[in-house]
Amino acid sequence: MNEKVFRDPVHNYIHVNNQVIYDLINSKEFQRLRRIKQVPTTVFTFHGAEHSRFSHCLGVYEIARRVTEIFDAKYSDIWNPDESLLTMVAALLHDIGHGAYSHTFERLFETDHEAYTRDIITSPETEINAILVKVAPDFPEKVASVINHTYPNKQVVQLISSQIDCDRMDYLLRDSYYTAAHYGQFDLTRILRVIRPVENGIAFSRNGMHAVEDYIVSRFQMYMQVYFHPASRAMEVLLQNLLKRAKLLFKTQPEFFEKYSPHLLPFFKNDFALADYLALDDGVMNTYFQSWMTSEDDILADLASRFINRKVFKSVTFDQASEKELHHLIDRVAAVGFDPDYYTGIHINFDLPYDVYRPDVHNPRTQIEIIQKDGSLAELSTLSPIVTALTGSNYGDRRLYFPKEMLQVDDLFTADKEIFLSYISNEHFEYNK
Ligand code: ZN
């Protein structure tokens, strides 16, 4: 086919030279990703971050295309060029099962975006599957196995999923660009010059060590400054409580939801198929939230209004020691008149920026290897003191969320609020505005 190009603010041009890739992009399941935000609650804090899963998936594909192009040209002694199409397709489709407000939705309705990714690729009812079976009858299964890490060729698996893969490289650059938080930038061009296929995976040549180090630091800073931002997490807590209220009310007031949120009924009834899942997107959900603002149920209407109008909950951090004191705070929220089931929430975020391979842990990580002068491999943290500092430790915090009204001097101000305020300023908790 004639090359098609997509303009992209992160990679400038995304090149498509293969009809299979072009057809996949034009499938309805892939086009759906245009209607799903990449970071749906982060956008409440960083307003530029309106970008979609569609743009991220194209970006991951483009990085995979550039890597496999280099591997095909320079390393065909150790890299099998027959794997290139599979790698690019897996890169393009790795997030195809993501839905509207994925992570919150999953927790409430027990859906699983990874299982949907597999279904969309392997189920005969999708356009994506029809395109993939034309490549080879077993091709859909191969693509799904790369994405769930069971494909035998570790080079392919590590390009899609490891501590330095095409997915992470794209989302760091993309989220950094759209949030305008520059921490996430690193030298992708340099990394593409030093990435190599090796016997059992992927490694980096020694002269690119600092580019890889910079990528690890960028990733750490993006988690701390952007992904774990307290206000974005407040919106996640609010959304979770809103959906929880809707799910409960459906049992007694099904007519309201039949009228105002028909596409959610299969999930409220816990009887849903792939097609039901694919019918949801951010626009559908946001429209429902707006209509819930008219509900006669005060809690549903109020939570929906807080979500639509970005009235964020406030929070305090706590630790394992102060966790047992939390009930004092929650009791005061209840005493002021807020149902704590819907007006408080705990949000815990921790990330391990980098780790070495630890065979004894559950899901051990593939460590990043640097090729030495003599051809042997050395693990990254043995060479980089900066990476050593970030290796093996979790960073993040635990937060209790509550309504902003708990901090305001207003009509609701009673002894309970006073006690609440004295609690959050004691040594057990940390409140910062
Ligand atoms: Zn991704």
Image (cartoon, rainbow, N blue to C red):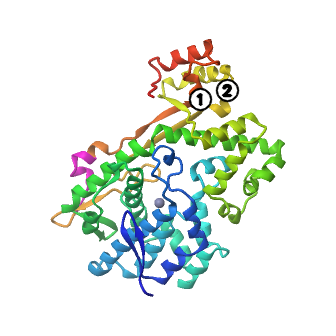
The foreground one among 57 and 382 is 57
Q: Badge 2: how crowded within 10 Å, few (<14), some, or many (20+)?
A: some
Q: Residue at x 48, y 58 (%)?
A: 51
Image point (30%, 48%), residue name: 217
Is 196 magenta? The answer is no
**What span is colored magenta in the figure?**
377-387
133 versus 186 height, above or below: below
Query: Residue 172 appears at what percent x and percent y?
Result: 38, 55
Determine which of the numbered discs, if any, sits on residue 403 in the image: 1
Name the amino acid, label 1.
Answer: Pro
Q: Are marks 1 and 2 in contact (CB under 8 Å)?
A: yes
| Label drawn at residue 338 | 2
User: Disc 1 on helix, strand or loop?
Assistant: loop
Q: Nearer the viewer, residue 399 or 417?
A: 417
Circle 2 SS class:
loop
In the image, taking residue 269 as reference, residue 433 lies left or right, namely left
Q: Left or right of 325: which side holds 264? A: right
Left or right: 377 as drawn, with respect to 133: left
Q: Nearer the viewer, residue 211 or 122?
A: 211
Residue type beneath disc 2: Phe
Q: Residues within 10 Å of mark 1 (few under 14, many from 20)?
A: many
Most extreme residue toward the bottom is: 1
Name the quarter where the C terminus is drawn: top left
What's the distance in space between the residues labelled 1 and 2, CA to CA? 8 Å
Residue at 38% x, 55% y: name it: 177
Q: Is residue 379 magenta?
A: yes
Question: Does residue 57 lie above or below 405 as drawn?
Answer: below
